[in-house]
Amino acid sequence: MLTAEDRRILKQSWEKVANIQEEIGCEALTRLFAVYPTSKTYFPHFDLSPGSAHIRSHGKKVIKALEDALNNADHLHESMAELSNLHAYNLRVDPVNFQFLARCIQVVLATHLRGDFNAQVYVAWDKFLCCVIEVLAEKGLVATRLASPSQFEAPLPTPSEAGGGSIAASATATPKKPCPLALPLRAEEG
């Protein structure tokens, strides 16, 4: 939960970068693609070279969404519902990518704010971005689970269950039963 002090810090730090927000979006995406190259898979039609028109355009959208979230921090679920649905159901973005992007945004903010990006500013941004990630990821987790239920099946059996004592035997064994903790994905599966 964001405190009044967190909100003040967020607003103050955001105002300090007001004239370069588009650049921050571009740099954050460039960093995302460099540090987490698997995130490139969601942009097959983009020119992913640093500073390209595609990255600048999408970076601008990211920053606009972040600014909207800042302005509607009390109603994130409502204000980000459309964006959450888009990324979960249409684009099918793995929710971990939101965490990656949040890290990149923090690094870019730190490089631009320099000494003004102290521990209090970091904590406020971290709390806020965690709230944004939670909203964006909650539908994505459901969509990911529905799209690929096999990832929620039982782990490999222990070596004794696999019929041999070697690690190699357990690594190649096929699970024999579903995980007892796995919940039905849909009502008709239960």
Image: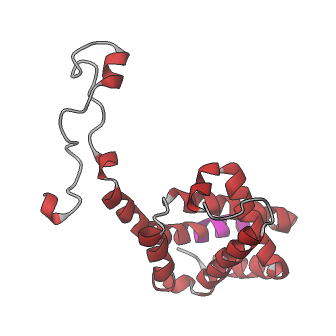
**In-image side of 107 versus 82 (left or right):** right
Image coordinates for residue 122, horizontal then vertical, percent: 70, 64
Along the viewing direction, whichever of 33 and 45 lies nearer the viewer: 45
- Quick one: quadrant of the C terminus? bottom left
Question: In which image quadrant can residue 161 be found?
Answer: top left
Q: Residue at x 69, y 77 (%)?
A: 63
Figure label count: 0
| Location of residue 169 with respect to 102 vertically, above or below | above
Image coordinates for residue 55, horizontal then vertical, percent: 72, 68
Q: Residue at x 57, y 76 (%)?
A: 2
Q: Tell me if residue 119 can be seen.
A: no
Image coordinates for residue 75, horizontal then vertical, percent: 49, 85
Question: In which image quadrant can residue 98 be found?
Answer: bottom right
State the scheme by which the image is colored.
Answer: secondary structure
Along the viewing direction, whichever of 139 and 49 lies nearer the viewer: 49
Instruction: Please provide the residue range marked out in magenta.
Output: 121-128
Q: Is residue 35 magenta?
A: no
Q: Tell me if residue 152 can be seen.
A: yes
Most prominent secondary structure in the magenta stretch? helix
Q: Residue at x 23, y 18 (%)?
A: 160
**In-image side of 168 versus 136 (left or right):** left
| Location of residue 32 with respect to 25 vertically, above or below | above
Image coordinates for residue 81, horizontal then vertical, percent: 46, 81
Q: Find the residue positioned furthest to the front.
A: 45
**In-image side of 175 versus 103 (left or right):** left
Question: In which image quadrant can residue 58 be found?
Answer: bottom right
Q: Residue at x 59, y 77 (%)?
A: 3
